[in-house]
Image (cartoon, coloured by chain):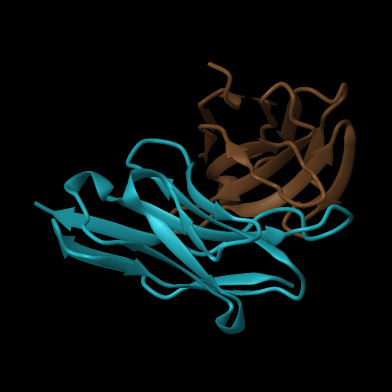
Amino acid sequence: AQSVSQHNHHVILSEAASLELGCNYSYGGTVNLFWYVQYPGQHLQLLLKYFSGDPLVKGIKGFEAEFIKSKFSFNLRKPSVQWSDTAEYFCAVTGSYSGGGADGLTFGKGTHLIIQP
Amino acid sequence: DTGVSQNPRHKITKRGQNVTFRCDPISEHNRLYWYRQTLGQGPEFLTYFQNEAQLEKSRLLSDRFSAERPKGSFSTLEIQRTEQGDSAMYLCASSFRTDFYNEQFFGPGTRLTVL
């Protein structure tokens, strides 16, 4: 069974600080990897995704993530955070190929990020 | 708005009552997913459909839960004899699944409170 582990459940940073949120996954096949964000009172929105190709992917709002296959990791980064980045961040994985089983997203427990002005 | 929509947005019910939620996916999407999210947790997969066929059900989906997608468009999720432990946010997502990628778009969710 696939699983996702997010190492930091609560992170507090000051504006302009750099951010890195850890995500490790366990899955036996080729994967699609995602970071979703949930701003207060809003629904899940896709930040960025990795399907194949360049392991460094760029998403919206200045976020990027690096897929390191040998480490089963997909860490999220942003060089300079803003107060508006305060939100819940979820890493998720699903199998890459169509077919039965393992098609739903498996999410980590999330990281609650608070940016202090 | 061409995103995923869910109704109702909030539902309060008494224990033992039945509830039904509706999800309207993005129109060209062939797959529709249901998830459940409790406070402080990430969403947990419940079930998904490809067109009208229900292809996978999580072990989280007890016999009291049933989902349908009768014409391959909207879907309903019914919970019979609700229990307090069913209180959660129920999320719907849709995607256009290919052999290489599966990007799921989420709706706003239905928040269920069982008293």
Camera-side residue of B105 and B33? B105
Camera-side residue of A78 and A36? A78
Chain letter, colour cyan: A
**Residue A9 visible from this viewpoint:** no
Camera-side residue of A89 and B19? A89
Instruction: Give the residue at x 80% y 44%.
Output: B98
Q: Quadrant of residue A101?
A: bottom right
Instruction: Give the residue at x 87% y 21%.
Output: B71
Chain letter, colour brown: B
From the viewer's perspective, is B55 left or right of B3? right
Instruction: Give the residue at x 41% y 58%.
Output: A64
Q: Residue furthest top?
A: B1
Instruction: Give the residue at x 56% y 83%.
Output: A71
Q: Quadrant of residue A103?
A: bottom right
In this rendering, is residue A4 above or below B31? below
From the viewer's perspective, is B4 left or right of B71? left
Q: Quadrant of residue A51?
A: bottom right
Where residue A52 appears, x then y in whole percent? 65, 60
Camera-side residue of A93 and B20? A93
From the viewer's perspective, is B70 left or right of A14? right
Where residue B82 appears, x then y in whole percent? 66, 41
Where residue B109 appears, x then y in whole percent? 54, 34
